[in-house]
Amino acid sequence: MAVLVTGGAGYIGSHAVAALQERGEKIVIIDNLQQGHRKALLGGKLYEGDLRDAAFMDTVFQENDDIDAVIHFAANSLVGESMKDPGKYYHNNVFGTLCLLEKMNEYNVRKIVFSSTAATYGEPENVPIDEYDRTLPTNAYGETKLAMEKMMKWFDVAHNIKFVSLRYFNAAGAHESGKIGEDHSPETHLIPIVLQAALGQRPHISVFGEDYDTPDGTCIRDYIHVSDLADAHVLAVDRLRTGADSSVYNLGNGTGFSVKEVIDIARAVTGKEIPAVMEARRAGDPAVLVASSDRARQELGWNPKRNKLEDIIKSAWSWHEANPNGYND
Ligand code: UFG
């Protein structure tokens, strides 16, 4: 048996590949290297190409007829960009997933673990958010991820392709080996940007909005270590291999931190000043996103181990200090 990981050279994908590798799984990777990095792969066989390229996908499935499960990361994932260029998100995320599901059906692969997001909920009705809460995305990125989930539901009904959709809250941190970490270009995520400011690569961190309905006026997010997310994917593959039905799980720590709190913790971890400048809100940002992950704990047996935000930021800081230019590729 082999696991196909799409987007396996990306930030979260590469940590999932590392977790599969540690378990001794056979791994096949598809990545078009738009965002991913060859050097981020600690194992597996890379096929460089795009999900939307049917001939390419035929080669991957024909050369690896032992693939029994897919973990699907390949997608664009920037809230801000999705508000300016929604077409890119519908094309790569929604159409890309359609192409993948059709090929899975053609090659009789009937298990998929999906990289979904808290952005499917939009402005939450309840905090913490659970999987039964309303999904009403406030940005195009979240809308495409919700559309992808719904597509999987209908491919399950029609073709018996079982899915586990994992709705992540805010991924952060780096692998304990120090070999892989976060390197986006451009970087838009809060923690790596704060650490770039700590390294002097940016003059300051811009805080997007100080007028939200939160105690200090800045947005609150639930930060979860990328290796804990990676572990959940391995557990989700295990669950599907037992013949379980399709399901959806939130993955977060259950504790929210404001943008200002994140900056303060990063100042303590790095010992650097990290200047902050207040700016206008960024389009599409909900005020508060905090997860209830009880269901993942109960049904997947997920037990995140790297819970303290200080430790998550420490692991990210180790990576950024050692690799100030990321993978440098
Ligand atoms: N932020 C700043 N300044 C920055 C960058 C971010 O103030 O320079 C703020 C944002 O406005 C937001 C918070 O920090 O309030 C976190 O922003 P991120 O961009 O780090 O992450 P998001 O909360 O936007 O995360 C969303 C979804 C995730 C998804 C991710 C992908 O909730 O599920 O986008 O980009 F994976």
Image: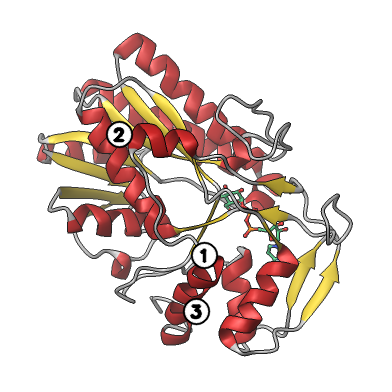
The residue tagged with tag 1: helix, strand or loop?
loop
Q: Is mark 2 within 8 Å of ligand 1?
A: no
Give the labeled residue for mark 1: 308
Q: Is residue 85 left or right of residue 33?
A: right
State whether residue 254 is above or below residue 313.
above
Query: x and y percent of residue 277 in the render?
Result: 82, 76
Q: Nearer the viewer, residue 73 or 98?
A: 73
Ligand 1 sits in quadrant: bottom right
Give the labeled residue for mark 3: 317
Q: Residue furthest toward the right?
A: 211
Q: Amino acid at mark 3?
A: Trp
Res 33 visible = no
The residue tagged with tag 2: helix, strand or loop?
helix
Q: Nearer the viewer, residue 98 or 299?
A: 299
Residue in the picture at 61% in, 90% down = 271
Residue in the picture at 65% in, 52% down = 81
> In which quarter of the view is residue 238 placed?
top left
The residue tagged with tag 3: helix, strand or loop?
helix
Q: Amino acid at mark 1?
A: Lys
Question: CA separation, marks 3 and 2?
Answer: 40 Å
Q: Earlier in the sequence, mark 2 or mark 1?
A: 2
Work out which quarter of the rendered image holds the C terminus and state it: bottom left
Residue in the picture at 47% in, 86% down = 321
Label 2 Cα neighbours within 10 Å, binned few <14 / some 14-19 / many ≥20: some
Query: x and y percent of residue 43 in the render?
Result: 19, 61
Res 23 visible = yes
Label 3 Cα neighbours within 10 Å, binned few <14 / some 14-19 / many ≥20: many
Residue in the picture at 62% in, 41% down = 119
State whether residue 114 is above or below residue 256.
above
Give the labeled residue for mark 2: 54
